[in-house]
Image: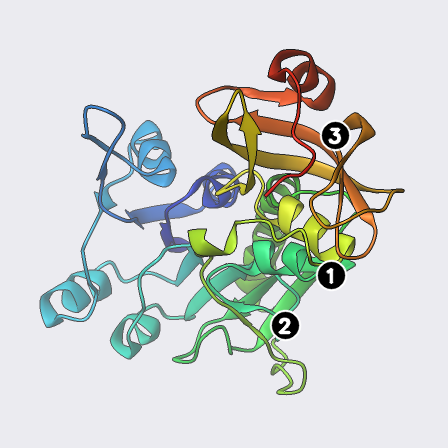
Amino acid sequence: MKIIFMGTPEFAVPAFTEIVSAGHEVVAVYTRAPKPAGRGQAERKSPVHVAAEGFGIPVHTPKSLRNEDEQAAFAAFDADVAVVVAYGLILPKPILDAPRLGCLNLHGSLLPRWRGAAPIQRAVLAGDKRTGVMVMRMDEGLDTGPVALADEMPIDPDMTTGELHDKMMLVGADLMGRSLAALERGSLTFTPQPDAGATYAKKIEKSEARIDWAKPAAEVHNLIRGMSPFPGAWFELTLGGQAVRIKALRSTRAEGSGAPGTILPDLTVACGEGAVKLTLVQREGKSAMDAATFLRGAGPLPERAS
């Protein structure tokens, strides 16, 4: 089939590679424009942009798809279908209607739960026990289109967003490959989403990342794993007379009690209810390290974290 692929981050690369490897004709790739990054603020291309150039496929980076010229250029590709994976721009109706078979989206949740920008992180932050990936046909709503195929998976108690992301992007690539094969055969069917159980996965804000030790251990643990690896849940310790920001990148539920923030043995910290043991941390300006390594280098710890 003639396909337009629309995606931006690392999450979209396996699906893109799967489509090319399956022998489909990818006539164009749409991705977000390069952005300044790093100390030198040199423009950095998106992971999908880099992958597309490796395959010699033309790349388009419009700032918007709302103007008529961009819509006409998109329609001129005469694609059978557009595949959208974490693209990052809103698709107006003329874009949605241009491909002969519509636009298929790979979404990282069990819709209608966690529609929106950050479904993987929101599932972990909420302590969900299960999630999945779904292929749906896009409409003008926010992740409201009918669903074709889905793969469910468990979220293990200590699993981080990063680990779930990496698992889902591989499962999702396979799911999209199977969906396109069925679409090509004319056997892909769609089921409308129910309205019951719909939730919105709003974008993650850095202001959410500070740990409040007064909250129950379950919530603190979910925050730590939900914010790992980025932006990283954090707290402060007074080390050598100075307040130092510490990112908590991995934790587990633990035994122990005390006033919220009390530092217990083995880098366990008391919460409003219960305690969490920090197993991977990152001191400001340093590399991530396990708890034992951190304790060896930190010197005397204060009685409480803040």
Q: Amino acid at mark 2?
A: Arg
Q: Which residue is mark 3?
A: 267
Alpha carbon of mark 2 to alpha carbon of mark 3: how far? Answer: 35 Å
Figure quadrant of residue 128:
bottom right
- Residue in view at x 44 percent, y 51 percent: 206
Q: Which residue is mark 2?
A: 113
Picture layout, residue 301 above or below residue 252: above
Q: Quadrant of the C terminus?
A: top right
| Residue 236 appearing in the image | yes
Alpha carbon of mark 1 to alpha carbon of mark 3: how far? Answer: 26 Å
Q: Mark 2 and mark 1 in contact (Cβ < 8 Å)? A: yes
Alpha carbon of mark 1 to alpha carbon of mark 2: how far? Answer: 11 Å
Crowd tier of the residue under label 1, counting other residues whose Cα lies within 10 Å: few below 14, some 14–19, many 20 or above: some
Crowd tier of the residue under label 2, counting other residues whose Cα lies within 10 Å: few below 14, some 14–19, many 20 or above: some
Mark 3 residue element: helix
Mark 2 residue element: loop
